[in-house]
Amino acid sequence: MNAIRNTLTRAAQVITFSALAVASVNATAAVKFRVGFDAASNQYAVYMTPDSVPSPDMLLSAQVTLVVPHATDAKRFNVENISSNIPGINWVDHSRVDAPKENQAADYISLGYYFSGTKVSPFGWVAGQEKQILTFTSTQGCVAGVKLIDSKDAFNQLPNSAGTNPGNDFLNIGWKMTNAYIGNYGDAVTCSTPGVITTPPSSVTPPAACIPTSKDVDTLKKIEKLKTLKAEATSVTRQQQIEALIGRYQNKLSCKA
């Protein structure tokens, strides 16, 4: 009896999966990737924009590969504190190739997807609307030139010298169960260099009697984060950059003394 029940269960699973596959045949498979850097939070973020909404919205596999300027020792770019914006969806730094012979000026870091729980969480896509998928930090802070791999990258021509498959990937049942990734948008990361600070540090600190309004809450949180980053910064240049950012956010405050 148990054998019959197990056979029927497996058959039902196959039928259900096949039905989902058939239902998704007509869905347009198209999603683009972008990477950016937010100076206020000192975080990198990966964004995606779909051309349609997958039905069902069930991710099977995904990979996002960063292309960063090659460096060694303390200047070597690292990925830390990966955080997903989709509940139940997780990302891990699972592959790295430094300075392959196809492009010795770059290091390639691949982030792979896995889910926790018993059911894959939907992404809540809206056609044509950008969605922040994940964030991460690097001890190097903002590094100009960080970008995502594309189809023309020499290291992405298979087989490559490392025997890996670094291409970006996004396989969703509702998008024909094929790789829905069609390319990147936006530019490589750029890092602004603040000008010389002419005002004394005390001028960028809210006066003790300042009473913030409800609109100032988010700005004050960012200022506190920047103060923490400044205290942890090991170079004078980085401290000055953060001090300038604090000043910019301080100027946005509308609190009244």
Image (cartoon, rainbow, N blue to C red):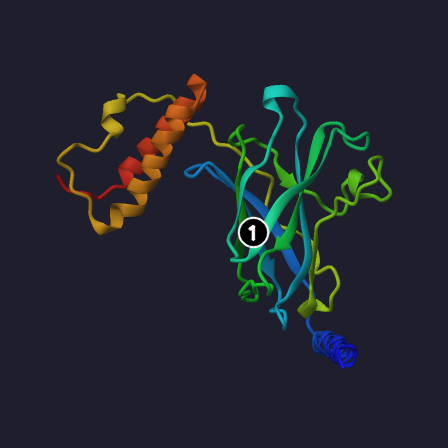
> Which quadrant is home to the C terminus?
top left
Q: Give the residue displayed 40% in from the left and 23% down from the top.
A: 239
- Residue at the extreme right of the image, as rendered: 159
Give x and y (percent) for residue 12: 73, 79
Q: Which quadrant would residue 58 be assigned to in this image?
A: bottom right
Give the image location of residue 144, x and y in percent. 57, 32
Q: Residue at x 75, y 78 (%)?
A: 2
Q: Is residue 71 depicted above or below 87 in this figure? A: above
Q: Is residue 22 above or below residue 231?
A: below
In the displayed structure image, the side of residue 101 where residue 59 appears, left or right: left
Expressed as whole percent of the image width and height from the top left, the position of residue 25 reads: 74, 74
- Residue neighbourhood size for the residue with mark 1, other residues' Cα within 10 Å, grouped as few (<14), some (14–19), many (≥20): some
Local SS, label 1:
strand
| Residue wearing tag 1 | 47
Question: Which quadrant of the view contains residue 69?
Answer: top right
Residue at the far front in the pictured view: 1
As displayed, is residue 106 above or below residue 234? Answer: below
Amino acid at dot 1: Tyr
Residue closer to the observer: 13 or 143? 13
Q: Name the quarter where the N terminus is drawn.
A: bottom right
Between residue 7 and residue 201, name the one nearer to us: 7
Say if residue 136 shows up in the picture.
yes
